[in-house]
Image (tube, rainbow, N blue to C red):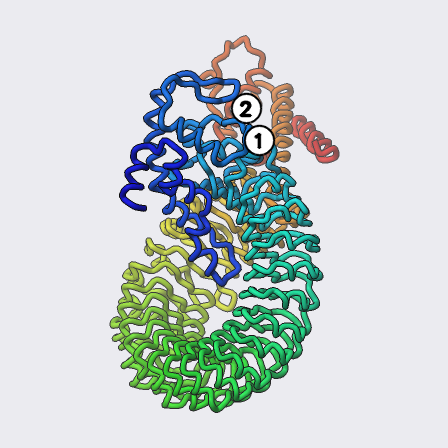
Amino acid sequence: MSEDENTAEAEGIASFESLEEAGVIEAMSDPLKEAAPSWEKEDSYQFNETNASSDMEQGSASSIDQLDRNEEKDEDQASDTNEADGTPQSSNSSSETKIDEVYQRARFPIGRRVSPRISKEKLGEFGLQSNNFTVKLEAKGLQEFPVDILKVKYVKYLYLDKNQIKSFQGADPGDLLGLEILSLQENGLPSIPLEIQLFHNLRTLNVSNNEISQIPKELLQLGNMRQLFLDSNHVESLPSGLESLRNLETLSLGKNKLTHIPDSLSALKALHTLNLEYNQLTIFSKFLCFLPRLISLNLNGNKIGSLPKEVRELKNLENLLMDHNQLTFLAVEMFQLPKIKELHLADNKLEAISPKIENFKGLRFLNLDKNLLKNIPKKISHCVMLECLSLSDNNIEELPRKIHKLKNLKQLHVNRNKMIKMADEISHLNNLKSLECSGNQITHVPIEIKNCRKITRVELNYNNIMYFPVGLCALPSLDYLTFNGNYISEIPMDISFSKQLLHLELNRNKLLIFSEYLCSLTNLEYLDLGKNQIKTIPACVSAMVSLRVLILSANKFEKFPKELCALKALQVLDISENQLQQVPSDISKLKAIQKLNFSSNQFTHFPVDLCHLKTLEDLNMSQGNGKKLTRLPEELCNMTQLKTLDISNNAFKEIPKDIGELRNLVSLHAYNNQINSLPPSFLSLKALQHLDLKGNNLRVLPNAIYNLLSLKEINFDDNPLLRPPVEICKGKQLHTIACYLQRADERDEKILEKIFNIVANNITEINFEFLQQKLHMKSSENSIPVKNTTPLSERVYQAFIKWKADQNLSLTVTAIRDRLVRALNMIGAYDIMDRITALNLYTSAIKL
């Protein structure tokens, strides 16, 4: 914008001509020109909201700011307002009023009623800002289209995702003319409202993730539409008349129920991105082949068995996505696509690839995972621009000899094939960064691999490698290396040179010792040596100052290695499935530890020293294959940061009474124990979401378990439950259990009250005194503020009520009843006991 234009804008811009000259009207009418780099050049079919919003905000900020300043000034100067039509009435016409009037004449049809402005206070209610054209009201609980929002200013980009809006009822047609982007994702729309035809300037509509079953003809009247997103709906067919959407560039219909493509689709001559993934298409329609500007075509997740010969007509196609289909061969005409860059053909039934693949000179990404390929044509070496080649899960025995000509190759993935050797030619791939050859029968890695100096990641899991490949130790950029499931028995000294290594896995090998050479890896953060035969740890492990994750499971440790306590940065330690019997007090030196796995060891007692680890968040003491523990220490409750606790497969009979101190506990796994009750403090675990108490001796669940509002998953199977019954708990629904317990509470209260009345109406003065002694009641003279003339039955009943109140915090209603019954037996009140027994039989029969 020129200096003169800025000056005109600063002075208020009092006429339509000056508005137009200042660039304000142009900015309002054509935002897609401003956003061209992000909208028109984007190859992906995804909805690019961020770029659209940010570009519009930047493009409109300067012009709108001045209008805002004028609005603030003129709000104080305005006099009367005609409440009938909302038109401002003022003897002094401000610059803002003039702008508003000229703006309405310029943009809207003759006769349109001028709408009143919404105050800044109203803007605040919606959480809006008045300095741009974008309004975002996602997840606001809206059930109606926000008509008033469009009267705030000239809204162009409206995001109403995650609401319950079903129609545009009440919207002024004139207000709708300004909208160019409308997003209504996740509103539960059963259909697109027919009023959509009023949005004449709409360029982008996103109604993905709704319940829409068909596209209305009214939508086809929006000739300015550039982008239409209807993903994740129930659309079964496309309407006729698609040719009216002549400007449509992006059409996304992924995850619907389309079974065929109509010939009218070929009329969308401007279309460059088409997404039809995860529908029910069985045929690659030839009509798709006559979209002259199509750049990206996504047909993933359909049931297409072949390509038509007309596919050669897609001269501008760059990206073809056909993963998860039923292709058995590729039509030779497909190799006539001159601009193809990405080809996704994973999870099909291809048995061979034509040598004509050499025609794909610009191909950069080729995914052929999960097919039936036995070899790759030599001519693939002509695809000199190829950067990623993925061939995993096939039957390939060797790679093409000339693969070294793929000088731009950065990723080579051939996992789970039948390769017995790694091709020497790989060592000439100077730009290779990622090499994955897991799940083959490779016995060694050529020393020449050291020439691939840009490699950062190597995966060679589950092969037949016996010796650690020293060539890898010379790679200056290698930071991720995995050798799980091989036959490596020792670590070479050369690994000491891999100072840059961050991640190393040697799980399930034949290592006998924790090599001192590993201790030279001072930058290593993740080390997995599980399932080997290691017995001790060298003292120099303290040099591994960056180590955060250490896995030593399923080795031969009989004593906990004290040397590990020097790892100040260690956050995760897994030493499960060993023969540990105790833990040293030095473990408290692990100041950063967050996760410990001691499962399946041979502890004689629960390691109390673990309870001093204040930073611990996850503790696993499950002893499925270890020696069963019988007692949990009270000190367990000191680990207040604990989020996950697994004490399954032991012989615990009770849970510490102060378990409620673990305020952050989210998951408690205590299945297969002998736990017979839950302490009262258990109900203080307000953060608890996952509770598994399967296979214990629980007979009663706490009455107020329904107060644990965070609980999402529960399991009380295989317990001898009486309250609630096993049948109630089978569904694993807390609500069902809670409802039962609440009703049971009410029932028990009624029964207890009846028992109080039976005793009060039948007990003698002498027996009442004896009963007070047995129940440790306070004497009636001190505890009941009534006169001596009060009838005995009333005094007894009031005494029971007070006694119950005194016991209520520590005893359940059932426990109070049982205690009273025992006391009556002790004083020999057998006639009263007979009445109570009769009551119990009666209430059991009718389930009061």
Q: Tell me: residue 809, above or below residue 373.
A: above
Around disc 1, counting alpha carbons within 10 Å, would you say few (fewer than 14), some (14 to 19), or many (20 or more)? some
Of residue 583 and residue 631, the one placed in the foreground of this image is: 583
Query: Residue shown at 58%/50% (left/top)?
Result: 208
Q: Tell me: residue 267, above or below residue 387.
A: above
Of residue 135 and residue 754, the one placed in the foreground of this image is: 135
Q: Type of residue at label 1?
A: Leu
Q: Are marks 1 and 2 in contact (CB under 8 Å)?
A: yes
User: Which element carries disc 1, helix, strand or loop?
Assistant: helix
223 vs 452, left or right, is right
Residue 67 shows in the view = yes
Residue named by callout 2: 800
User: Which element carries disc 2, helix, strand or loop?
Assistant: helix
Task: Please provide percent x and percent y for residue 290.
Answer: 63, 66
Residue furthest out toward the right: 845
Query: Residue shown at 54%/65% (left/top)?
Result: 296
Q: Earlier in the sequence, mark 1 or mark 2?
A: 2
Of residue 393 and residue 163, the one placed in the foreground of this image is: 163
Task: Please provide percent x and percent y for residue 439.
Answer: 51, 80
346 vs 134, left or right, is right
Task: Please provide percent x and percent y for residue 74.
Answer: 35, 24
Residue named by callout 1: 820
Around disc 2, counting alpha carbons within 10 Å, would you say few (fewer than 14), some (14 to 19), or many (20 or more)? many
841 vs 111, left or right, is right
What is the quadrant of residue 249 in the picture? Answer: bottom right
